[in-house]
Image (cartoon, helix red, strand yellow):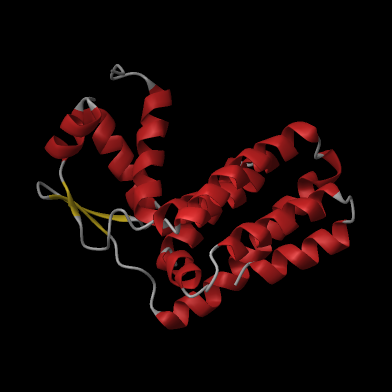
Amino acid sequence: MASEGDGRFESSLSRVLREEILTGRLLAGSRLTEAELSSRFGVGRGLVREAVQALSSQGLLISRPNRGAVVAPEAPREIRNLIVPIRRTVEVYALRLVFDELGEPDFTAWGRILERMRDACQRRDFHAIAEADLAFHRQLLERAGQPDLIVIWETLVGRIRSHFRKTQKLTADAMEIHEEHRAILDSFRGRDLAAAVRLLKEKIT
């Protein structure tokens, strides 16, 4: 159990809830209360309030005084059509920042994510596929080392979160999702920035 002052757990709590929302384990309209979250995670309500506030600022939750919070609806279709190109720009920017510095530890980290993705694809577990998909792209943002960039990316992704699952379920062979991401990693290894940017842009749809 974490203490009230454990900022690391606060970040972990926010991340767990964020992943559940982004991957559809918590659907739009789902109600969350401090009591339920405090009991579930074994933390004080102060940490829960901070996590809810953080996710509310990213547009993932709608906080209601004395009534808990609900998972926010997604952006309408017209807005989604604007968000995808912006997300593409953010990830390409991050890639350009770190491309020349990428090394085996980075490739190993992506490789572990791809292993989870391959297992999820074999099982056609679309929640787990979405988790691995998000982790793969988040790894790039975290490697860039700019917290503001991560916040922007998470906000964008949060507004089009069901897009991951809907797109994946339309894929006849789920293993194609794994192969697409493996190709992106191979392009990073290839040391050809132009090729890597081109493929990353192509796969963010």
Image x and y of residue 111, in percent: 67, 41
Is residue 145 in view?
A: no
In the picture, residue 204 is in which quadrant? Answer: bottom right
Q: Give the total of numbered labels.
A: 0
In the picture, residue 105 is in which quadrant? Answer: top right
Task: Using the image as rendered, state which of residue 101 and residue 116 is in the foreground.
Answer: 116
Q: Is residue 136 above or below residue 1?
A: below
Task: Using the image as rendered, state which of residue 205 and residue 47 is in the foreground.
Answer: 205
Instruction: Locate the N terminus and report the quarter of the image it occupies.
Output: top left
Image x and y of residue 24, in percent: 34, 58
Is residue 151 in view?
A: yes
Instruction: Locate the C terminus and report the quarter of the image it occupies.
Output: bottom right
Image x and y of residue 101, in percent: 83, 39
Residue shown at 37% from the left, 51% from the top: 57
Q: Is residue 65 above or below residue 87?
A: above
Image x and y of residue 193, in percent: 86, 56
Residue shown at 35% from the left, 53% from the top: 21
Task: Tell me: 198 left or right of 94.
Answer: right
Residue shown at 61% from the left, 57% from the top: 178
Q: Residue furthest left?
A: 66
Task: Tell me: 133 left or right of 125.
Answer: right
Task: Tell me: 184 left or right of 150.
Answer: right
In the picture, residue 13 is in which quadrant? Answer: top left
